[in-house]
Structure formats: C-alpha cells, structure tokens
Image (cartoon, rainbow, N blue to C red):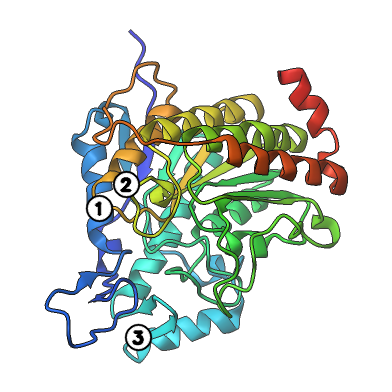
Amino acid sequence: MAEAEKIHVFWDEGMLKHNTGRGVFDSGEDPGFLDVLENHPENGDRIRNMVSILKRGPISPFISWHHGTPASLPQLLSFHSPEYIQELEEADKTGGKMLCGGTFLNPGSWEAALLAAGTTLSAMRFLLDGHGNIAYALVRPPGHHAQPTQADGYCFLNNAGLAVQLALDYGRSKVAVIDIDVHYGNGTAEGFYRSNRVLTTSLHMNHGSWGPSHPQNGTIDELGEGEGFGYNINIPLPNGSGDRGYAYAVKELVVPAIRNFEPDMIVLVVGQDSSAFDPNGRQCLTMDGYRAIGRIVRGLANAHCNGQLLIVQEGGYHITYAAYCLHATLEGVLNLQIPLLSDPIAYYPEDADFTKKVIDRMKKYYTINVPFLREISQISKEQN
C-alpha cells in the first residue's frame, strides 16, 4: 500500500515569544474604564490551536513536522533595505517600540520574526532541493504587509517575499503568489512591483489604504510598473463575499492568470481572517470555501510546477475557527474527496450575485488594460 502524501509543516515554538500584549483590540491601550481587556488579535493562542489541530486533528496522519532556523542578515537583505533592518535591530536592542498602528516590536519579537522568516526560507529550500512537493510554513509574526522599507499591519519581515526571492535565486524562472488573506498583500506586491518574473495576485476585502504604513489601496489600477506592469493582480471583493463569490473570483481571474503566466513555483499565502467569524475581516468564507480554494491551487501546482507548492501562514484571528479553516485548506490541498472534519458553524448564508457582478467588471477591466491578460476571456470561454 502506497504511503499517504504528506504536507511538510515547518514550525518552531520560539515564534511564541512574540508577545503582542493586551488592550482594546489591537491598540495596546487601556482606557482605564474597562474591567476586561483583550489579547491583541495576533497572539500566540491562535497559532497554538493551528499547531494542535494539525498534531491531533484528523489530518495528522498527513502531516510531517520540521524545524526552521533563524534568518541571517544577508537573507533579509534579499528583500528588505539595510536601513529598515537596522531600524528593527535598534528597536530590539532598546526594548522595543510600536512601529505603526497595532504593530508592536516587544522583547522577544525580533527573535520570533527572524525565526518566522528563516522557517519560511527553510520550507522553500526543502522544496527547491527536491525533498517534497508541499510545504507549509506555520509562522508568526505574519509578513505579507511588511514592505522593503517599513513595517505594517502586525508584520516586520516579509516571509513570503523572502521565499519568493529565494526561489528566483535558486534558478526558478517565474513565481506566482496567490494571497487569500482578507487584507491586501501590499508588502509582497511592493517588493516585486517592477518585476515580470513574479505574478502577485491578492483576493482581499475592499479596505483601501489605512495610512502611511499602508499607502497602497489594493485597487485594480495598481498593476505594477515598468517590466512589472500587469503582473500585480488585485481582486478587491465586496464585504460579505463568501464561498461562492471567492470560488468565482479564483476561477474567473486567478486560474486564467496563472495559466497565462506559467510559473514554475506557486506560493499560497493563507489567512483565515477571510472567514465568516473573524474579528479582523468582513468576509464570509467557511470551511467549504477554504477547502475549494486549496483544491484549485493544488491543481494549478500540479499543472505548472510539478506539484510543488509552498503555503505561508498570515492572518486568521478567531482563536478556534481559524484552526478549523486551516485544516479545511490543507484538506483541499491534499485533494481529499471526503472532508475529514465537519464545520462547527456548518452554514452561513451568502448572496453571491453582487460579488459576481463586481468580479465580471474586474475581469473586463483586466482584459482591456493588461496585455498579459488579454487572453483571459478566451480561456474562460474554453473552460465553460
């Protein structure tokens, strides 16, 4: 009997040393008139549950565990500027600081950030060296908002961006990023905004810019620059988009873009904050939706990358349901025909008609304005 396919999970408990504190949501503030404050949403408990569901949940026979190592300075400089890394090192030496809204570098945070970056690089290197097909970097602090020169949105180092650059340095010709975190993967996009070797796609709620740390809007007109024009595909979805809306967006926009681009490595950037009950998002994905996305992305990896796929953890702030949605995503990636774990929520009502109309308008826009995607309509017609 053939051995079951494994997902190689890279994890290190040292990432739990990043203590984001308590306060009013992510502000770190105590107004003085509340008896009970809450943990910052990006806290260790969310990751502990992700680890435990993979170790003790029904998917555990499909999981192989690996350790990472901290990233080195030269590795960080493959994506980030020396001045920015020096700023982070100095903040760590002086006891920490708030780098931007909700983003606290506290004692222990820099060590955890280096581990997150290095663990993601270890996962990518595992694939590049031919040791497996599917690797998952289960890391925190998250990274996809971190830009080459600044922190943003709970992120210090861009874990996925560093892994993409490593793949290019190893000789991979083209890498595609599929980001399904509820927030725009602005840092990764910024890092490769002028490159035609990296296709960055991001499905996110239509939140726009939230200040100097996040100047990008995540709108469809942010297409890239120079040689990278057309290689940044933003898919800002209306609030309330759920399983059917996301599936439609992936099939109508992401799949044709990947097929046109023909990457030899895919990085799936996952955030379970697109789920129906996440405190940091306004979308309505359930386990079925994540399962479907995982299955589609695996199909793309099989078609273009000899089955190789790197998955990188980002957001997901509901302490229990995020772990369930992760489990479902990996079930989809494994292409399991029968769900291993039932949804504790089971059903969430969704009206996908408006979302589909918005997606159709985006599709028309990209078809007209982006040379790289002008075949998208014909490909979609052939699929249908």
Q: Quadrant of residue 1?
A: top left
Write the residue at 35% across / 92% down: 94
Write the residue at 56% across / 41% down: 128
Question: Would residue 343 appear left or right of 103 to someone viewing this image?
Answer: left
Q: Residue furthest top?
A: 1
Res 87 seen here: yes
Provide residue 53's location: percent of width, then percent of height. Answer: 23, 40
Nearer the camera: disc 2 or disc 3: 2
Provide residue 22's location: percent of width, then percent of height. Answer: 23, 75
Question: Would residue 250 appear left or right of 12 to someone viewing this image?
Answer: right
Which of the numbered marks, if any, corresponds to residue 96? Answer: 3
Q: Are marks 1 and 2 in contact (CB under 8 Å)?
A: yes
Q: Residue furthest bottom?
A: 94
Q: Quadrant of residue 30?
A: bottom left
Question: Would residue 210 appear left or right of 227 to someone viewing this image?
Answer: left
Q: Is residue 356 above or below residue 180?
A: above
Nearer the camera: disc 1 or disc 3: 1
Res 308 seen here: no
* Distance from Cα at disc 1 to Cα at disc 3: 26 Å
Amino acid of disc 1:
Ile
Q: Nearer the viewer, residue 115 or 216?
A: 216
Label 2 element class: helix
Q: Nearer the viewer, residue 47 or 368?
A: 368
| Residue under numbered circle 2 | 322
| Residue under numbered circle 1 | 319
Q: Quadrant of residue 222?
A: bottom right
Write the residue at 77% across / 61% down: 194
Using a 10 Å C-alpha cutoff, classify the residue at mark 3 as few (fewer than 14 neighbours), some (14 to 19) or many (20 or more). Answer: some
